[in-house]
DNA sequence: TCCAATTCAATTGCGTACGATTTAATTTAC
DNA sequence: GTAAATTAAATCGTACGCAATTGAATTGGA
């Protein structure tokens, strides 16, 4: 890219960064009634797929380190979404499990999010295309950083 | 989307969020020699296009509020990238101007960033396609949020 | 002219992100 | 069997993001 083209508007990094922040705000609207933040919602998504994960596996899923997860999970435990337990078998690992509240909220939370997305008329096609492109971007960037 | 498909991997929001964080880390590598963070680099990109902008216009460009910009710009002033001045004509506006260091660093910083991107073999086509898709996503999300 | 509405930047408080380091538990190599 | 290496979570410090509020400066209408 020529130096003249290095404008804010031409930067892929900025459009992705901007889209990400707008997405977070949009989801925050849907999640507000549940007193959940967006990263907290991502934790729940992962736990709804696989309950009882050790902290480091949650970290692999979401690409978070313990420095981000430890306080995040502590807040979620305080609000009753999950529990944190050291299993006697390996007391280095912290097992994260959903509480009843965490499990039972799946339906209502997913409904709220889906309704919010659908209401705004997201085309399936645009969604899928953007998903594929950005997944490829993630793969590429992961390779670039290792 | 059916409820079974509400997996982390299927979420556009997560792939965009993940890509954004990976981009930030990648750029951070290129910017480290200049002691610049990624958001600080975005400020410079905007000022290189238009010097002497009031704070709120920078905010429009980057979609930041004064709560984010005030401390961000203060740090950049402390490190000698820019100056903050209240013009006598309207003492509500804070005019942000590049210092000599800020202006003169444009070449070296852009070179470092471009080399970093090019070195990793980013294809022009993939870049452009992802740019267009994500710009459309930004437009859509902005409409959804207003 | 004068005061109510508006426009701005700054402040406050909270929750991420993340590099770097520390501390504790377990595994391994000898 | 034990010291070294490894694995894992927690801690520390810094820098965003952003909702909500505050406070100062300006504008505009009666």
Image: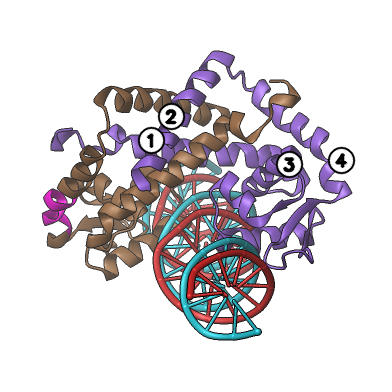
Chain colours: A purple, B brown, C red, D cyan
Would residue C4 appear left or right of D25 to someone viewing this image?
Answer: right
Would residue A99 appear left or right of A73 to someone viewing this image?
Answer: right
Nearer to me, A116 or B2 = B2
User: What chain is tagged by disc 1?
Assistant: A
Query: According to the image, label 4 marks what residue?
Result: A104
Q: Earlier in the sequence, mark 2 or mark 4?
A: 4
Q: Is residue A83 visible?
A: yes
Q: Position of residue A36 (x, y in %)?
A: 71, 48
**Residue A50 bears which disc, if any?**
3
In the image, is residue B55 part of the stretch drawn in magenta?
A: no
User: What chain is tagged by disc 3?
Assistant: A
The count of marks equals 4
Q: Earlier in the sequence, mark 2 or mark 3?
A: 3
Main SS type for the magenta part?
helix
Query: According to the image, label 1 marks what residue?
Result: A140
Contact (Cβ within 8 Å) of mark 2 with mark 1:
yes
Query: According to the image, label 2 marks what residue?
Result: A136
């Amino acid at each position: 890219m020529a130096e003249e083209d290095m404008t804010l508007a031409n930067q892929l990094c900025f459009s992705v960064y901007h889209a990400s922040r707008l997405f977070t705000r949009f989801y925050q609207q849907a999640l507000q009634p549940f007193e959940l933040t967006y990263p907290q919602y991502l934790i729940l998504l992962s736990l709804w797929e696989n309950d009882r994960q050790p902290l480091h596996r949650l970290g692999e899923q979401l690409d978070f380190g313990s420095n981000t997860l430890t306080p995040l999970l502590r807040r979620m435990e305080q609000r009753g979404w999950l529990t944190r337990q050291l299993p006697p078998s390996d007391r280095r690992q912290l097992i994260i499990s959903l509480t009843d509240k965490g499990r039972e909220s799946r339906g209502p939370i997913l409904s709220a999010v889906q309704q919010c997305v659908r209401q705004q008329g997201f085309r399936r096609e645009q969604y899928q295309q953007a998903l594929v492109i950005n997944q490829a971007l993630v793969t590429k960037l992961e390779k670039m950083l290792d």
